[in-house]
């Protein structure tokens, strides 16, 4: 799930704020019985994190690649069409309904105000999002491919592989382009569109119309020129890019790299990525970062 979906989740789960957890179940081993009898004080999203704040601690949920959730309020589903499978990791029952979470990474944060641990200026969906700061941070990694930089959760928290691909297509940028070779004007356009497209993603997600409105992600034909859409796994993160070679001016040499299946297996294993060598999230107040390395990958 990408940032806009997490943002929407926080919105959908509002009816549980101020309510007490009456029953807890699930196969998580983080000590979930601790939630029983506790009142949920707040729910918020940061990047791809969904955070449930209790009195002296918080639960941080990261849906990774396959995680999903569902909730009902007074017997009616409030979460729509997410796919689900297997035994739940966590079920929280309240007097007015329940929240069920599958296949997500759960972590307890010992903090009575976990919001303070997060830098909301880096959150693409936040009212505090700071495009100038993002621009400066990108400039610190001139040798990285722009497709990798867009997935860096310390710069663009919430951007996942769908947003990355759509933004690069909308701004007619090659995913292979080194960040340092992108002009100031073009980079400003990319940073601006990361926000604009994320907001559009949210609106489309609300009405279950996201997939059919994507222009390049998992498409076969370019909606602009009618050319072929290529797909390649590349970069330090080994994530897949979808692109139109003509509209995004991808050099011919880049089209000759191995197809996804042969490239994928070794992409991450070969050496530590530039991303993992860097520090994780930028916490405020000198507190310990709460963003694990896994956050730097992406989920749709
Ligand atoms: Zn095209």
Image: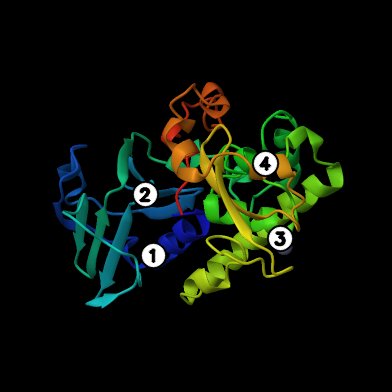
Residue topped by disc 2 = 63
Circle 4 residue: 254
Rendering coords of residue 175 (x, y %): 67, 45
Classify the position of the N terminus by image quarter: bottom left
Q: Which of marks 3 and 4 is nearer the N terminus?
A: 3
Tell me if mark 2 has few (under 14), some (14-19) or many (20+) residues whose alpha carbon lies within 10 angstroms of its own.
Answer: many
**Compared with residue 299, is residue 78 higher up or lower down, i.e. above or below?**
below
* Whether label 1 touches label 3, CB < 8 Å: no
Asked if residue 183 shows in the view, the reply is yes
**Which residue is label 1 attached to?**
14
**Distance of label 2 from label 1 (alpha carbons):** 19 Å
Q: Does the residue labelled 2 lie within 8 Å of ligand 1?
A: no
Please tell me whether mark 3 sits on a helix, a strand or a loop. Answer: helix
Residue 170, labelled with which disc?
Answer: 3
Say which residue appears at 49% left-offset and 27% top-offset. Answer: 287
* Foreground tag (3 vs 4): 4
- Residue at left 17%, top 52%? 37
Question: Which of the two marks, 1 or 3, is nearer to us in this view?
Answer: 3
Above or below 271: residue 225: below
Relative to 206, is 39 on the left or the right? left
Q: In 3D space, how far apart are the residues under numbered discs 3 and 4 (Cα atoms)?
A: 20 Å
């Amino acid at each position: 799930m990408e940032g806009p979906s997490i943002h929407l989740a926080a919105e959908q789960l509002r009816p549980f704020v101020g309510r007490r957890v009456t029953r807890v179940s699930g196969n998580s081993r983080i000590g979930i019985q601790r939630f029983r009898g506790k009142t949920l004080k707040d729910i918020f999203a940061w990047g791809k994190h969904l955070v449930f704040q209790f009195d002296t601690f918080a639960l941080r949920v990261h849906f990774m690649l396959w995680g999903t959730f569902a909730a009902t309020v007074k017997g009616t589903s409030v979460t729509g069409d997410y796919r689900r499978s297997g035994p739940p990791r966590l079920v929280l029952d309240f007097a007015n309904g329940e929240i069920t979470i599958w296949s997500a990474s759960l972590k307890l944060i010992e903090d009575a105000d976990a919001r303070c641990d997060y830098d909301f200026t880096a959150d693409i969906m936040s009212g505090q999002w700071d495009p100038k700061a993002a621009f400066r941070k990108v400039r610190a990694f001139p040798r990285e491919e722009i497709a990798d930089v867009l997935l860096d959760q310390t710069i663009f928290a919430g951007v996942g592989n769908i947003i990355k691909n759509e933004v690069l297509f909308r701004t007619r940028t090659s995913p292979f382009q080194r960040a340092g070779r992108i002009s100031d004007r073009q980079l400003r356009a990319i940073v601006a569109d990361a926000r604009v497209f994320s907001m559009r993603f949210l609106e489309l997600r609300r009405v279950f119309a996201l997939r059919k409105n994507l222009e390049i992600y998992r498409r076969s034909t370019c909606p602009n020129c009618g050319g072929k859409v290529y797909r390649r796994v590349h970069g330090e993160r080994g994530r897949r890019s979808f692109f139109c070679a003509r509209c995004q001016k991808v050099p011919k040499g880049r089209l000759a790299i191995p197809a996804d299946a042969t490239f994928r297996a070794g992409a991450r294993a070969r050496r530590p990525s530039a991303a993992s060598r860097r520090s994780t999230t930028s916490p405020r107040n000198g507190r310990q970062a709460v963003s694990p390395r896994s956050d730097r990958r992406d989920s749709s």
